[in-house]
């Protein structure tokens, strides 16, 4: 299994890949642009190609992560259009860098209490708009939510349904965040066999492309999204090892989104996980 962490693009995309390799990572995640805005970035194609080539040479796997303000369940309007253009731009960058795809959180919608499906309809619409002309190889990777603020997007059923209702389902895969799955209450640390059985029934695993390997700072069903270092949270190392031992998870890239230790490097945590899974 390839494991790594989130790295900065301070020194470009190639620089991010090199930084990942420096800490002993076989996989990494990066923000394709400023993580706090939805701008369309005119990126350096030579830098992106150099990243792609470097990753191919060294067997590195990468994924991009959409900026924080990206919300797939919005009302029509200026922000809706801006978000569509931003995610299309993320896909372009991810493709140029040779990445598996762009991780985007499942949408969140607060309004329309009289019509609980409205948020889901808007999300399907936006996914269709984003992917209508997308012929690249990078996938849009939907990530399960922790349920903070809004419960939307916490269950495997929602992920499967949304994907199957979009026009270009073949361009959509999944990213499983272990902290979110636990915090949402879907997984309580003791029912993994049931969760995995349900995932098989729903045919979730064939579309699972990456795992965000995070422990949780809060208990199951707290709906609080706070990551902890592997083995230092409420899931605990045994829960995480059990999940990783699932045959369908074998070979998937694992990305740590855990707090950086005082050294600033995830080197030790990567080594720790590798020692337990290989
Ligand atoms: Zn995550």
Image (cartoon, helix red, strand yellow):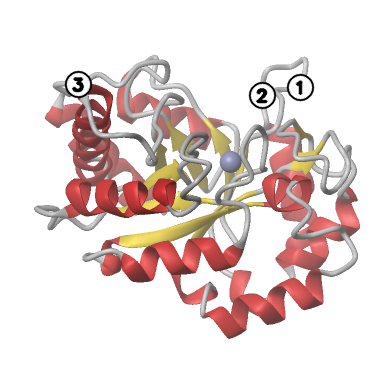
Q: What residue does disc 2 label?
A: 265
Question: Among all residues in the image, which is located at the extreme front?
Answer: 114
Q: Cα distance, mark 3 to mark 2? A: 28 Å
Quick one: label 1 or label 3, which is nearer the N terminus? Answer: 3
Q: Identify the mark at residue 261; answer none if there is no mark.
A: 1
Q: Nearer the viewer's eye, disc 1 or disc 3? A: 3
Respond yes or no on whether mark 2 lies under 8 Å from ligand 1: no
Residue 100: x and y, percent? 35, 53
Label 3: how many Cα within 10 Å (few below 14, some 14–19, many 20+): few
Report helix, strand or loop for mark 2.
Answer: loop
Residue 94: x and y, percent? 28, 41
Determine contact: label 3, label 2, CB under 8 Å. Answer: no
With 114 as the anchor, is 151 left or right in this view?
Answer: right
Quick one: label 3 or label 2, which is nearer the N terminus? Answer: 3
Determine contact: label 1, label 2, CB under 8 Å. Answer: yes
Q: Identify the mark at residue 41; answer none if there is no mark.
A: 3
Quadrant location of the C terminus in the rendered image: bottom right
Quarter assignment of residue 18: top left
Quarter assignment of residue 249: bottom right
Q: Residue at x 41, y 20 (%)?
A: 35
Residue 267: x and y, percent? 68, 33
Q: Nearer the viewer's eye, disc 3 or disc 2? A: 3
Report helix, strand or loop for mark 3.
Answer: loop
With 148 as the anchor, is 139 left or right in this view?
Answer: left
- Ligand 1 quarter of the rendering: top right
In front here: 180 or 62? 180
Q: Residue at x 61, y 71 (%)?
A: 250
Report helix, strand or loop for mark 1.
Answer: loop
Residue 151: x and y, percent? 64, 45
In front here: 80 or 118? 118
């Amino acid at each position: 299994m390839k494991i790594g962490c989130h790295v900065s693009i301070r020194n470009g995309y190639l620089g991010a890949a090199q930084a990942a390799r420096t800490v002993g990572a076989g996989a990494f995640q990066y923000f394709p642009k400023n993580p706090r805005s939805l701008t369309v970035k005119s990126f350096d194609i030579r830098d992106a190609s150099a990243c792609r080539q470097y990753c191919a040479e060294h067997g590195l796997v990468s994924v991009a992560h959409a900026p924080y303000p990206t919300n797939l369940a919005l009302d029509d309007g200026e922000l809706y259009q801006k978000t569509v253009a931003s995610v299309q731009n993320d896909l372009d960058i991810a493709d140029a860098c040779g990445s598996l795809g762009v991780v985007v959180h499942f949408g969140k919608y607060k309004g329309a209490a009289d019509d609980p499906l409205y948020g889901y309809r808007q999300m399907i619409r936006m996914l269709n708009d984003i992917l209508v002309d997308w012929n690249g190889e990078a996938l849009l990777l939907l990530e399960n939510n922790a349920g903070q603020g809004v419960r939307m997007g916490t269950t495997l059923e929602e992920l499967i349904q949304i994907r199957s209702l979009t026009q270009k389902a073949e361009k959509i895969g999944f990213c499983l965040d272990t902290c979110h799955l636990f915090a949402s209450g879907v997984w309580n640390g003791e029912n993994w066999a049931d969760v995995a059985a349900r995932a098989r029934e729903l045919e979730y695993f064939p579309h699972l492309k990456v795992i965000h390997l995070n422990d949780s700072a809060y208990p199951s069903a707290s709906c609080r999204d706070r990551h902890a270092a592997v083995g230092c949270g409420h899931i605990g190392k045994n829960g995480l090892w059990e999940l990783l031992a699932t045959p369908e998870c074998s070979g998937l890239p694992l990305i740590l989104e855990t707090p950086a230790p005082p050294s600033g490097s995830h080197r030790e945590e990567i080594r720790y996980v590798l020692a337990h899974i290989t």
